[in-house]
Image (cartoon, helix red, strand yellow):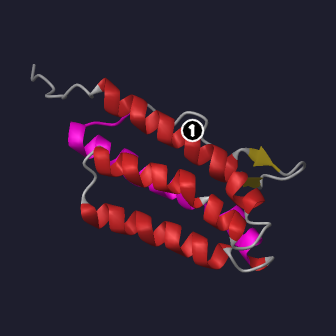
Amino acid sequence: MAEIDAKPLHIEDLHRVERLERLAAQMDSAFRIPGTKIRFGWDGILSIVPGVGDTIALIPAAHIFHSAYKMGVPSHTIGRMAFNSGIDYVIGSIPVIGTVFDVGYKSNRKNAALIREHVEKKHGGRLAPERGAFV
């Protein structure tokens, strides 16, 4: 019988990914509009104040970037993350349209997923399913 060559996942990377996913969920999916499946988070709430709110929402996004850098995420992936956050910031800064966009785009969740993908490749296996995932 052949042995499966499964590399053990580094527990600290798992914890980091889980913390980043929780932060991303708070920013993008913490609340649900009653009677719908529409989820939004603090990013959408902050975007009600055009420019200022979106600028404040960059603080958690910057934390996600910094964590990705510390975890060794490649620069091309960090570039994709920057694109996600840049689109969110630019379009999110437009009054009314930006708030609606922020509810649907969920750049922090996209960026946390890119980090998860990197860590899974790095360790040669899948991490536990994302906790607190909202669809």
Residue 103 location, x and y as percent? Answer: 71, 62
Picture layout, residue 94 above or below residue 10 = below
Residue 127 location, x and y as percent? Answer: 37, 34
Is 34 one of the magenta-colored residues?
no
Residue sitting at x 45%, y 50%: 64
Marker count (numbered): 1
Q: Examine the residues drawn in magenta and state their main secondary structure.
A: helix
Q: Which residue is mark 1?
A: 22
The answer to which of 39 and 28 lies nearer the viewer is: 28
Q: Is 31 displayed left or right of 13 in the figure?
A: right
| Residue 135 visible in the snapshot | no
Residue sitting at x 37%, y 31%: 14
Q: Is 46 displayed left or right of 11 in the figure?
A: right
Quarter of the image for residue 81 reads: bottom left
Quarter of the image for residue 48 reads: bottom right
| Residue 56 visible in the snapshot | yes
The answer to which of 73 and 126 lies nearer the viewer is: 73
- Numbered range of the magenta stretch: 98-127
The answer to which of 102 and 120 lies nearer the viewer is: 102
The three-letter code of the residue at mark 1 reads Arg
Residue sitting at x 10%, y 19%: 1
Q: What SS does tag 1 mark?
A: helix
